[in-house]
Image: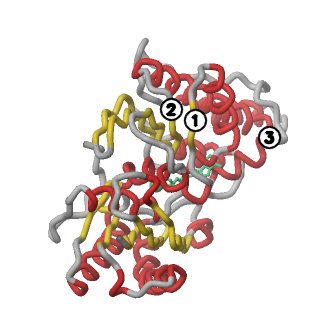
Amino acid sequence: MIMLGIETSCDETAVAVLEGTGEPSPRALKLRSNIIASQIALHRQFGGVVPEVASRRHVETIIPVIEKALSEADVSLSDITAVTATHGPGLVGAVLVGLSAAKALAVALSIPFIGVNHVEAHMYANFIEHPGLRPPFVCLVVSGGHSDLVYLKDYGDYQVMGRTRDDAAGEAFDKVARTLGLSYPGGPAIDGVAREGNPQAVRFPRAYLEKGSYDFSFSGLKTSVVNYVANVEREGNEIFVPDIAASFQEAVVDVLVDKTLRAASEKAVTTVALAGGVAANSRLRQEFSKRAQRKDLDVKYPSPVLCTDNAAMVACVGYFQAVSGKSSSLDLPAVPNLHLE
Ligand code: KG4
Ligand code: ZN
């Protein structure tokens, strides 16, 4: 089976070709191409993603990116078995571009169309590089739009154990980076500068919420950083960005690791997986590996390029759906606030 995946839910126009033997297993997969046309430079001048600008750029870029993905995979359109695209969550105008392209291809080629959930796709990025990974496991999905703690019982069978009550983890990174005068996107900027800082320099608050809760909240932490910076500057002192970045990052990482490991022990799984743009964070990966090892848990995370938005992960969900005989109707809408079922 040759799956074409399309992802346009935010600021990356991405298309991938994923081959599979038809078995419902990560071992069956071979990624043939994974093209990502990033809009980061375009949005950086505004300090964040401008939805209308993103949609227009997707329209301009989608066809060349499809062509490049096909040529790099050395396949032609007639080789494609099914076409799959994100139908939410995301910016509605952006989602619509990839979704419409996928439907048009499906009609023109008389092949199935499969609409997928972007958060589910982030989790499935783990299957592309870890052929031995099998459900059940607990997955932490942390990106610019989501912080979800998910018990993945089986392919397509999820229990959302917790989610953010306010800002997503990546959103907190982006906002704090702006306060510290770092460029967009804030996650990689903080990750980089924090390496020169002391994570114990400032004790920022960790929001654990009610006892036993798996939900997250990052807006209090963000406000605390903003107030800290304002106070230091009011006193006429200069802030030392690496220390603040490292201390903020430590507060986020502590809560994410604690709650995920607790969820893993509640569900008695032997594996935890990380997914989403924030899963590219070097400190998060390091702490997870260290603390999971103490509990005899296996930790999996995708390469950084498969943590941030890409279409390989979209093709991967589409593959497992196609193998189980599922496809979507051509009137499937773009759903900006789509939740995991
Ligand atoms: O998954 P993604 O590409 O898009 C969404 O679905 O939102 O995630 C983007 C988010 C941004 O907030 C970005 O700052 C964050 O992921 N991010 C990181 C790192 N790389 C990307 N956050 C922390 N550390 C990183 N290395
Ligand atoms: Zn994403």
- Kindly indicate whether the residue at mark 2 contacts the one at mark 1 (C-beta within 8 angstroms): yes
Query: Could you say where residue 45 lies in the image, as x and y percent from the top left?
Result: 62, 68
Helix, strand or loop status at disc 1: strand
Query: If you read the primary sequence from the N terminus, does the residue marked by circle 1 or circle 2 appear first?
Result: 2
Residue 271 image label: 2
State the separation of the CA atoms marked 2 and 3. Answer: 33 Å
Helix, strand or loop status at disc 3: helix
Query: Could you say where residue 176 lies in the image, as x and y percent from the top left?
Result: 63, 43
Q: Residue at x 58, y 73 (%)?
A: 42
Q: Vertically, is 162 above or below 32?
A: above
Q: Residue at x 57, y 65 (%)?
A: 46
Q: Mark 3 belongs to which amino acid?
A: Pro
The outermost residue toward the top is 211
Residue 89 in view: no
Q: Nearer the viewer, residue 253 or 209?
A: 253
What residue is shown with label 3?
242
Query: Could you say where residue 245 lies in the image, as x and y percent from the top left?
Result: 72, 39
Q: Residue at x 70, y 52 (%)?
A: 189
Query: If you read the primary sequence from the N terminus, does the residue marked by circle 2 or circle 3 appear first?
Result: 3
User: Mark 1 against mark 3, which lies toward the viewer?
Assistant: 1
- Kindly indicate whether the residue at mark 3 contacts the one at mark 2 (C-beta within 8 angstroms): no
What residue is shown with label 1?
299
Local crowd at mark 3 within 10 Å, few (<14), some, or many (≥20)? Answer: many
Local crowd at mark 1 within 10 Å, few (<14), some, or many (≥20)? Answer: many
Q: Quadrant of the N terminus?
A: bottom left
